[in-house]
Image: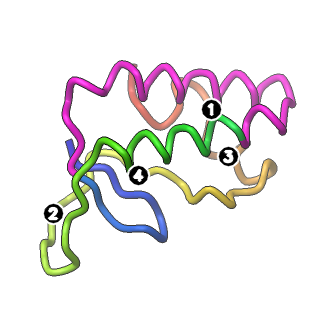
Amino acid sequence: MIIRIMGLGQYKVPSSLFDELNAIDNRIVEHVTKGNEKTYKQDLAALISKIKQNGKVLGAEEIVESDIIVPPEDLTFEEAKDVFTGSGIFED
C-alpha cells in the first residue's frame, strides 16, 4: 500500500499494517469528535511515526498513485474536523 504523508513524501507500507493504522485513524476520529485536541495531536504523531518506521520511502522520481493521503503533523485541530470524519482517512 502506498501512503503519502503531506509534506514528507510517499511510503510503501506493508498491507499487514493496515489494521493497526486504521485503529489509530479511528481513535483520531473519536478524539476530534469529542474535542480532545491533546490526544488528537498525540495519535496523529503516532500514525505518522508508524508509517515512517515501517514504510520504505519512495524516491521523488517514482510517480505512483497514493492509496491513502495522511495530513501533515502540524494539521490544526480545526482543520482536522474536516479531515477526520466518518470512518477517517483509512476506509474500514
The amino acid type, in three-letter code, at marker 2 is Val
Lower position in the chain sequence, tag 1 or tag 4? 4
Question: Nearer the observer, disc 3 or disc 4?
Answer: 4
Q: Where residue 59 sits: x, y (%)? A: 19, 73
Q: Would you name the residue on which mark 4 appears? A: 69
Residue at 83 percent of width and 23 percent of height? 34
Q: Would you name the residue on which mark 2 appears? A: 64
Left or right, 38 with respect to 60, comes to: right
Left or right, 60 with respect to 81, comes to: left
Mark 3 is surrounded, within 10 Å at the Cα level, by few (under 14), some (14 to 19) or many (20 or more) other residues, namely few
Asked if disc 3 and disc 1 are in contact, CB closer than 8 Å, the reply is yes
Lower position in the chain sequence, tag 1 or tag 2? 2
Task: State whether residue 32 is above or below residue 49.
Answer: above
Asked if disc 2 and disc 3 are in contact, CB closer than 8 Å, the reply is no
Residue at 20 percent of width and 59 percent of height? 65
What is the quadrant of residue 8 in the picture? bottom left
Instruction: Give the magenta-colored segment's residue range.
Output: 12-41
The amino acid type, in three-letter code, at marker 4 is Ile
How far is disc 1 from disc 4 in space, using C-alphas?
Answer: 14 Å
How far is disc 4 from disc 2 in space, using C-alphas?
Answer: 12 Å
Q: Where residue 87 sits: x, y (%)? A: 52, 24
Q: Secondary structure at mark 3?
A: helix
Lower position in the chain sequence, tag 2 or tag 3? 2
Q: State the residue in front, 29 or 20.
A: 20
